[in-house]
Image (cartoon, rainbow, N blue to C red):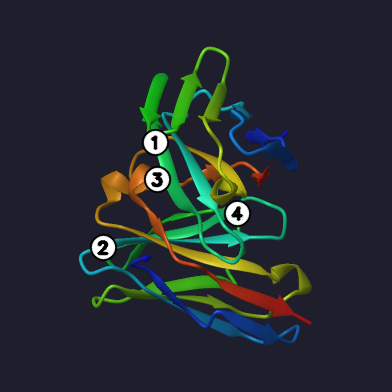
Amino acid sequence: QKEVEQDPGPLSVPEGAIVSLNCTYSNSAFQYFMWYRQYSRKGPELLMYTYSSGNKEDGRFTAQVDKSSKYISLFIRDSQPSDSATYLCAMSIGGATNKLIFGTGTLLAVQP
Amino acid sequence: ETGVTQSPTHLIKTRGQQVTLRCSSQSGHNTVSWYQQALGQGPQFIFQYYREEENGRGNFPPRFSGLQFPNYSSELNVNALELDDSALYLCASSPSRDRGSYGYTFGSGTRLTVV
């Protein structure tokens, strides 16, 4: 079993829809939870970062972490065609090494 | 525009050969990590360097090695290339080891194809 599970999609939604992306994990030691966006032929770009449990909002993006269920989510409101990309969840225990454990990524297509 | 530059962008090598990939981090970024991203997969941690010393390694064999230089550049070396080494190799830098979990800036990667 992988430490981090993520549905690879693809996920196709119409412009303006609310998008929900999710990851589950097995390692209860994870403290840092991140969402990255990766466009084709580019490196991952950090979208949201949450420490421990709770919600965080930034513009059209909301990240939620439920440590009791080992479940994290990213919501995108009023989705735009420019949001079309692969979304990767990533987690870390923290400490000196700060190794990131990534999900497989979900490919999102927002149709105009 | 990312502050992390990787070269080359694409590379084709033959099985058994050796390859060196290069990364130039932002000035002041003393922590650099390398990740391997196979097609359709998330990035996997190879190793991390802090102030020119390796301080963490993932499940990769010793033929994967690295160097970090005082001028904030770094290298990933892979010996005895195998077909499964074909992947996108990503460099990520951070201004401090403590911010690594959320402070990494990734480069656009080097696409390595082993034939």
State whether discs 2 and 3 lie on one chain: no
Q: Residue furthest top?
A: A68
The answer for how far apart the CA atoms under marks 1 and 3 are is 14 Å
Asked if residue B63 can be seen in this view, the reply is yes
Which amino acid is tagged 3?
A: Asn
Q: Nearer the viewer, residue B57 or A68?
A: A68
Which amino acid is tagged 2?
A: His
Mark 4, residue position: B59
Q: Nearer the viewer, mark 3 or mark 4?
A: 3
Subunit ID for the residue under disc 4 = B
* Quadrant of residue B101 within the rendered picture: top left
Q: Nearer the viewer, residue A91 or A54?
A: A54
Mark 4: secondary structure: loop
Mark 2: secondary structure: loop
The answer for how far apart the CA atoms under marks 4 and 2 are is 25 Å
Mark 2, residue position: B29
Instruction: From the viewer's perspective, tell me whether residue B89 is left or right of residue B27.
Output: right
The answer for how far apart the CA atoms under marks 4 and 1 are is 25 Å
Mark 3, residue position: A98
Relative to A49, say whether B68 is above or below. below
Q: Nearer the viewer, mark 1 or mark 3?
A: 1
- Picture residue at 65% right of the left edge, 76% below the top: B112
Which amino acid is tagged 1?
A: Tyr
Q: Residue furthest left?
A: B28
Subunit ID for the residue under disc 2 = B
The answer for how far apart the CA atoms under marks 3 and 4 are is 15 Å
The answer for how far apart the CA atoms under marks 2 and 3 are is 15 Å
